[in-house]
Image: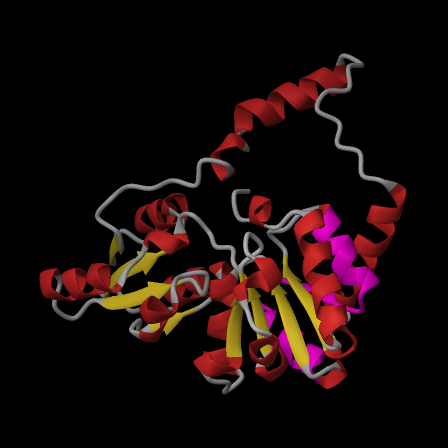
Amino acid sequence: CSMADMASAKQVDDCWDALEKIGVAGKTIPITYMNSTAAIKSFTGKNGGAVCTSSNATRAMKWAFEKGEKILFLPDQHLGRNTAVLNLGLSLDDCVIWNPWKPNGGLSESEIKSAKVILWRGHCSVHGRFSLENITAMRAKLPGVSILVHPECQHEVVANADVVGSTEMIIKTIENSPVGSKWAIGTELNLVARLANRFADREIHFLDKTVCYCSTMNRIDLPHLVWAMESLVEGRLVNQISVDTEVAKYAKVALERMLALP
C-alpha cells in the first residue's frame, strides 16, 4: 500500500521523540488507519493507541480524546482531518500536518502545542486524485446526480459531496437508493464498476474522468491466490509473511483496542 509506505517506523519514532521533547507525548494518543504497516500498528499499541477503519474512525477518535488531549493520526491525513472536522466538530485550525521530511515536522512548538489533531502527511494515491473540479464537471454533465465519496478524499471534495462514507457505507447507500437514481462515486474504480454492474437500474459513474486503479490492491488477485493454495497442497510454502514477535504483540494490542471500542 503506497499510503502505508508514507510512514516508516523510524519516521514515526522520530516524530514521537520530538513530541516527548516538547512535552506533549504524554497527552497524545496515536490512532493509525488499518492501511498501515505492522510496525506502525505496534507503535500505536505500545503508546496507548488503537487501529481504526474508515467505518469506525469517529468512534476511535472520540475514544482517544477521552484518554488524552491530542491525537497523532497515522498515516492518512485526509481521513483524520475529515473525521475531526465533519464528525467531531473540530475546525481546520485545530489540525496540523506533520511532514516527516522536515525538522520538527515543519511545525513550531506553539503550533504543535495548540493543535488537537496532528495529521501525518500521508494519503491514498487513488482517493487523493478526486477534486472539486471533478464534482463541478459531473454536476454540469449529469443534472440531479448525487456525489458519493470515501473519507480518504481531500477535504474540499468531502465537504462538497452529497454523501460521505466508508466502503461499507458506499455499498449500502447504493443498495438502498431508488431505481433510476444517478450517482458519481469517488472511490477505487473496481468497486464502482462492481456496483454499476450489480445495479444496472441505477446510473452509476466513476467520479474522475481519468481511470485510476489501485495498483497495489490489484496485485492481490485470484491467480495468485490459486497459486498459493496449490503450492500448499503440494507441500511448498510460498510468500510466507513473518512478523517480529514484539511487533506482533503490540500490533495485536492496538487491534484489540479497536475491536473493544464502544
Queried whether the magenta region covers residue 56, the answer comes back as yes
- Nearest to the observer: residue 202 or residue 170: 170
Could you tell me which residue is drawn at 31 percent across and 50 percent down? Answer: 196
In the rendered image, the vertical position of residue 192 relative to residue 243, given as above or below: below
Could you tell me which residue is drawn at 15 percent across and 61 percent down? Answer: 137
Q: How many marks?
A: 0
Coordinates of residue 66 in the picture (x, y in percent) = 72, 85
Q: In the figure, is residue 199 to the left or right of 141?
A: right
In the rendered image, the vertical position of residue 146 relative to residue 195, given as above or below: below
Q: Which residues are magenta?
A: 39-65
Queried whether the magenta region covers residue 130, the answer comes back as no
Coordinates of residue 236 in the picture (x, y in percent) = 77, 14
Residue 70 seen from this side: yes
Coordinates of residue 24 in the picture (x, y in percent) = 72, 77
Which image quarter holds the N terminus? top right
- Nearest to the observer: residue 262 or residue 76: 76
- Nearest to the observer: residue 141 or residue 25: 25
What predominant SS class does the magenta segment belong to?
helix
Coordinates of residue 106 in the picture (x, y in percent) = 53, 63
